[in-house]
Image: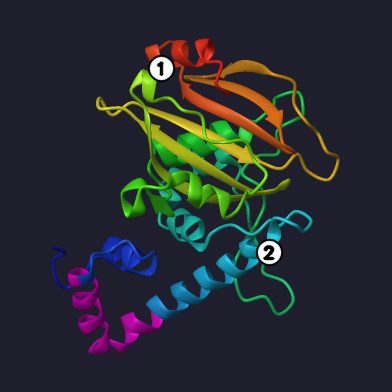
Amino acid sequence: MISMPPSERDLHAYVDHQLSDADRRLVETFLATNPQVAAQVRAWQQDAQALRAALSGALQQPSNPNLDPAVIRQRLKRQSRRHLASAAVLLIAVSVGGFSGWQAREMTLASPQLPMTDALQAYRLIAQQGILPADYKAGDDGDMQGWLDRYFTRANRLPNLSGAGFKPASGRLLSTEQGPAAMVVYENQGGQKISFYVRPPGPKNFLLPRGSRSDGDLQAEYWSGGGYNYAMVSPADTAAAQMLKQTVQF
């Protein structure tokens, strides 16, 4: 159970629907008697709703550069870690027109000679650093494939890595210059993590040949199929990385 008054982490969890019913009621009771905090929480909720609405139709539309408001909130709280933001090349942009949400550039402006750099950076932000909270957890209803199918109906099935001891644990929606993306994080009992990343190939339909590459401490296996680009990312020089190279299911 959360402590009272709720911390900022608790309030973000409330906005992202990650609290239990009992904790949610505690937060709502607190907000009812703290109008200033309640106003801030409502603003976060409005940002989140605007993003959800944008993502819901974006899969059939041109690329949408809008990032989740949680990304922006976390970045503003981490000014002392600008090297991380620079590495991810998350650039805050001024909102335009009547759109009230935040807008930003893609996490990377990497050259096309470096495929799926966004997948590697998403792994660092989500699986390693834990900066971005999950949109969906496998424990919610146990159907990670069903969650992914809501947004990527024609994409390949999630790789079955149960033989190597890895199971889908959480999912996160993202936005790239090519269009909406998603990352599913697999975990084993030892806490090791592998990610499955999917996004469209972009307006130029830049599909990828099957390949692999290393980036610092990470290894990526990438390919294309069903009109999407994919990557499986894991820490390099580990049993998990060796398992990915030997897996033929994706």
- Outermost right residue: 204
Which of 143 and 116 lies nearest the eye of the viewer? Answer: 143
Name the residue: 38% across, 25% down. 162
| Res 107 quadrant in image | top right
Judge whether 99 appears above or below 242 on screen: below
Q: Quadrant of the C terminus?
A: top right
Give the x, y percent position of residue 24: 25, 72
Name the residue: 76% across, 23% down. 113
- Give the residues drawn in magenta, as a range: 22-40
Q: Which residue is mark 1?
A: 240
Which of 86 and 155 lies nearest the eye of the viewer? Answer: 155
Determine whether, in the image, residue 90 is placed left or right of residue 154: left
> Badge 2: few (under 14), some or many (20 or more) residues near its Cα, within 10 Å?
few
Q: Quadrant of the N terminus?
A: bottom left
Q: Main secondary structure of the magenta part?
A: helix
Q: Is residue 76 magenta?
A: no
Q: Mark 2 falls on what kind of element? A: helix
Alpha carbons under labels 1 and 2: distance apart? 35 Å
Name the residue: 47% across, 34% down. 124
**Callout 1 touching callout 2 (CB < 8 Å):** no
Q: In the rendering, which numbered label is found on residue 57? A: 2
Give the x, y percent position of residue 44: 45, 72
| Res 229 quadrant in image | top right
Judge whether 162 appears above or below 153 on screen: above
Amino acid bearing label 2: Gly
Name the residue: 13% across, 66% down. 3
Q: Is residue 30 magenta?
A: yes
Give the x, y percent position of residue 192: 33, 26
Q: Mark 1 falls on what kind of element? A: helix
Give the x, y percent position of residue 9: 29, 60
Q: Is residue 133 visible?
A: no
Q: How is the image coloured?
A: rainbow
